[in-house]
Image: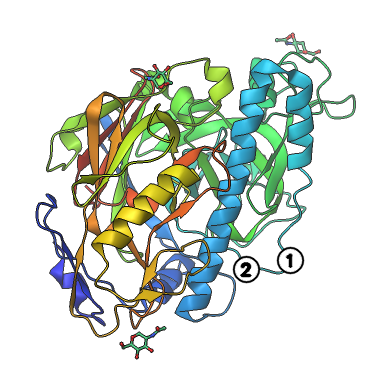
Amino acid sequence: MAWGACIAALLLLLLPAAGGGNGGVHCLEEGSRSRGRRALQGRQHLRSRAVAGATVLELRHHTFSSAPSKSREEEADALLSSDAARVASLQRRIETYRLIGSSPDTAAAVSASKAQVPVTSGAKLRTLNYVATVGLGAGEATVIVDTACELTWVQCKPCDSCHDQQDPLFDPSSSPSYSSVPCNSSSCDALQVATGSVSGSSSSSPACSDHQPSCSYTLSYRDGSYSRGVLARDRLSLAGEAIDGFVFGCGTSNQGAPFGGTSGLMGLGRSDLSLVSQTMGQFGGVFSYCLPLKDSGSSGSLVLGDDSSVYKNSTPIVYASMVSGDPLLQGPFYFLNLTGITVGGQEVASSSGFTTASKVIVDSGTVITTLVPSIYDAVREEFVRQLAEYPPAPAFSILDTCFNMTGLREVQVPSVKLVFDGGVEVEVDSGGVLYFVSSDSSQVCLAMAALRSEYETSIIGNYQQKNLRVIFDTAASQVGFAQETCGYI
Ligand SMILES: *[C@@H]1O[C@H](CO)[C@@H](O)[C@H](O)[C@H]1NC(C)=O
Ligand SMILES: *[C@@H]1O[C@H](CO)[C@@H](O)[C@H](O)[C@H]1NC(C)=O
Ligand SMILES: *[C@@H]1O[C@H](CO)[C@@H](O)[C@H](O)[C@H]1NC(C)=O
């Protein structure tokens, strides 16, 4: 693996425990965050190319921060708080969709309460997200890739409120192929269902009014950040592949530090208005990504289309079936049945979690894998047992299983495997098992956290998806995994 990446401050070598399978030595690089931030601010377009049967977009970490550089601990704290806020927001959205089917009134109530989440005061929230560059209208947009989002949106002129972005603002008036989506269109109906603004059966819709003939949208996120504007159509270009009449949100009022530096967001969810659904004709409802191990300076790839010959996977692809059921109730989320977890080859027992399959979502935008308490506790117990030789360290933010590894040159990391329905085993890269809070390794934590209640939904976060090819096949309702050393392929 990438030894060349280790020339900066080498902190600690992580050796996968014997039998780990993906055999690699990983290193952490000090100070990589600040370099990444400069790179993004210095207006850098990410590459893309078309190959037979697929389109490949370069992915990079989005590490923009509007705050002046902080200590490593402060950065980690901001990142994990932001992540916890996303997890809480996802729980509310998952619940809203679940209720849409059962009781429209309750769904509306939940959705209304969502809109009242206060903005976290003054906190410069940021998150570990991935960005890619696409063409829209006559310009380019560098957007955050989000598998839990229903709709692609970009900041639009004239801006009532916009965050800083590296690309010029999208200007509808200078794009001849631009049009707004009328209220009475099916896209507007789909949007209302997607954003939970109405139950799906109601005809009175807040997206339209007499003096507002076009369809307006509001998306609110995690920490109270939001994007508001009108639903529009324009030509989307993905490495020369043009998608005419692509429906997206033209956001004239946008707020939120996590988006800073980007033009907006690419909605890769499973619902009708997502990029995946809208490009069904071109890409067959299949996309995949490979997220690089290092925080910055390295690239991964987003592949649209089902041509698996472009992947650089080193193990065969294994597929887990998405949970079956009413798509309306599942919203944009990719649900799998998690049936087990092994730590260092040892299957963890859980009091209730694995007696029946546990529904989890696979998410590109959540960082830390967050599990229902019964499963998390079982993982933690086994992890602590296997790392008993290291002195414990205090908990940090949402991470409560920490060790003091100061002065150690090497540490054996137990291999962690996620097991899905049908016995599908996915090994987490050894670089995605531990989270280094401090640069002196005095606080090294298990990179997983517990949800507040058994009734919430576990989330597989991107920290545990690094160096994996993760394939979302909406046509065959399955998610594939294979080991891959991620790069721009
Ligand atoms: C939407 O409304 C416009 C203007 O009232 C009308 O011309 C058009 O046919 C309607 N479209 C649909 C799909 O109902
Ligand atoms: C997932 O688990 C549920 C509940 O145990 C079960 O009904 C379903 O068949 C399982 N598999 C899929 C692919 O949905
Ligand atoms: C970690 O261990 C080192 C050496 O054993 C010790 O000096 C240091 O105080 C410990 N740090 C914490 C935060 O426990």
Total marks placed? 2
Q: Which residue is mark 1?
A: 121
Whole-percent x and y of residue 373?
49, 46
Quadrant of the image occupied by residue 421: top left
Q: Residue furthest right?
A: 210
SS for callout 2: loop
Q: Could you tell whether 70 is left or right of 219 in the image?
A: left
Whole-percent x and y of residue 465?
32, 48
Q: Which residue is mark 2?
A: 124
The Cα–Cα distance between marks 1 and 2, rounded to whole angstroms, is 9 Å
Label 1 CB less than 8 angstroms from ligand 3 = no
Q: Could you tell whether 138 is left or right of 445 in the image?
A: right
What residue is shown at x 37% (from left), y 20% (from top)? 477
- The residue closer to the viewer here, 313 or 184, is 313
- In the rendered image of this protein, does residue 99 appear above or below residue 135? above
Where is the N terminus found, in terms of image quarters? bottom left
SS for callout 1: loop
Instruction: Give neighbour class at mark 1: few <14, some 14-19, many 20+ (Cα, 10 Å).
Output: few
What residue is shown at x 38% (from left), y 59% (from top)? 447
What residue is shown at x 22% (from left), y 57% (from top)? 414
Q: Which mark is residue 202?
A: none
Instruction: Give neighbour class at mark 2: few <14, some 14-19, many 20+ (Cα, 10 Å).
Output: some
Say which amino acid is labelled 1. Answer: Ser
Say which amino acid is labelled 2. Answer: Lys
Label 2 CB less than 8 angstroms from ligand 3 = no
- In the rendered image of this protein, does residue 211 appear above or below residue 405? above
- In the rendered image of this protein, does residue 290 appear above or below residue 33? above
Which dot, 1 or 2, sits closer to the camera? 1
Whole-percent x and y of residue 316?
13, 34
